[in-house]
Image (cartoon, helix red, strand yellow):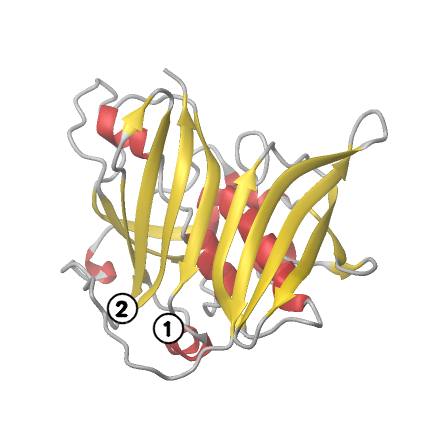
Amino acid sequence: MTLDLHPLDDALALEPAGAHRYTGRTTPAYWNMVGPFGGATAAVLLQAVLQHPDRLGEPLSLTVNYAGAVSQGPFTVQATPVRTNRSTQHWTLSIVQPGADGEWVTTTTGTAVTAARRETWSLADTPMPTAPGPDTLEPLAKGLGVAWLDRYEMRPVAGALPQRWDGSGDSSLSQLWMRDAPARPLDFCALAALADVFFPRVWLRRAHRVPAGTVSLTVYFHAGREQLAATGTGFLLGQARAQEFRNGFFDQTAQLWNDAGTMLASSHQIVYYKE
């Protein structure tokens, strides 16, 4: 990575490799326990769509299915527009890597929808929660054991990690201010990654640290390029909570607002957890 290149831009670097194909590689800056941070993987898939010469409009939704961990090293992204309508375009996505036996292994699948937005009647029906400003709150400590956490400045408002892992948790709700570290102007790829920064809800609800990993994540983009540009390098307020924990899986719903109170994105995911 060159000294003037942001770590996220380094992780998003893709090279054309034929029709609908791009090559990239993992970077240590966004490494999680057994592979890259899932938000960074989602951002890479979206980057392939954004780089595609046939793209229509801006991101409307992105769904990522984590079939297996992306191994350290090179990978290939397939981003194919399967149908283009007047205002929407539908994509299929995948990440593949060479396996030990020489066969290609699919680690990640997904879909995306881009759209040509137009001005219409609009309404914010879920207002941003009242919260103290980020400058009044302490940031989450660095060096918590996985590299990707150091790529974000996170200032918890409510629902921080339990101080005691004793089974006494009573809520899955988290609220926190967040932004890239070092600060970086917000764009769609960064927003997709930020939608996945929340700790597993099961850790909060149970106050018990168990293995957990996202199976499928969907991000809905409510803002266009203008709202993202207006946000700049400012903090986003993120809120996440679960709705059901059952038989080894739980869901999570999340919303992200900029500091002006505009909802930029919402997300849903289903997460595996081990007893």
User: Residue 245, image x and y in percent?
Assistant: 29, 27
- Nearest the viewer among 152 and 84 is 84
3D distance between C-alphas at marks 1 and 2:
8 Å
Q: Residue 4: in sight, yes or no?
A: no
Where is residue 181 shown, x and y percent of the image?
Answer: 45, 56
Q: Is residue 143 left or right of residue 83?
A: left
SS class, disc 2: loop
Examine the rendered structure and indicate whether residue 219 appears above or below residue 56. Answer: above
Given the current orientation, which residue lies at the most extreme top position?
275
Q: Given the image, on which type of amino acid does mark 2 rest? A: Asp
For the residue marked with disc 1, what is the amino acid? Answer: Thr
- Name the side, left or right, on which 38 lies relative to 239: right
Return the x and y of residue 274 as percentages of the image width and height. 40, 19
Residues packed near mark 1 inside 10 Å, few (<14), some (14 to 19) or many (20 plus): many
Residue at 21% of width from left, 18% of height from top?
A: 167
The residue labelled by disc 2 is 259
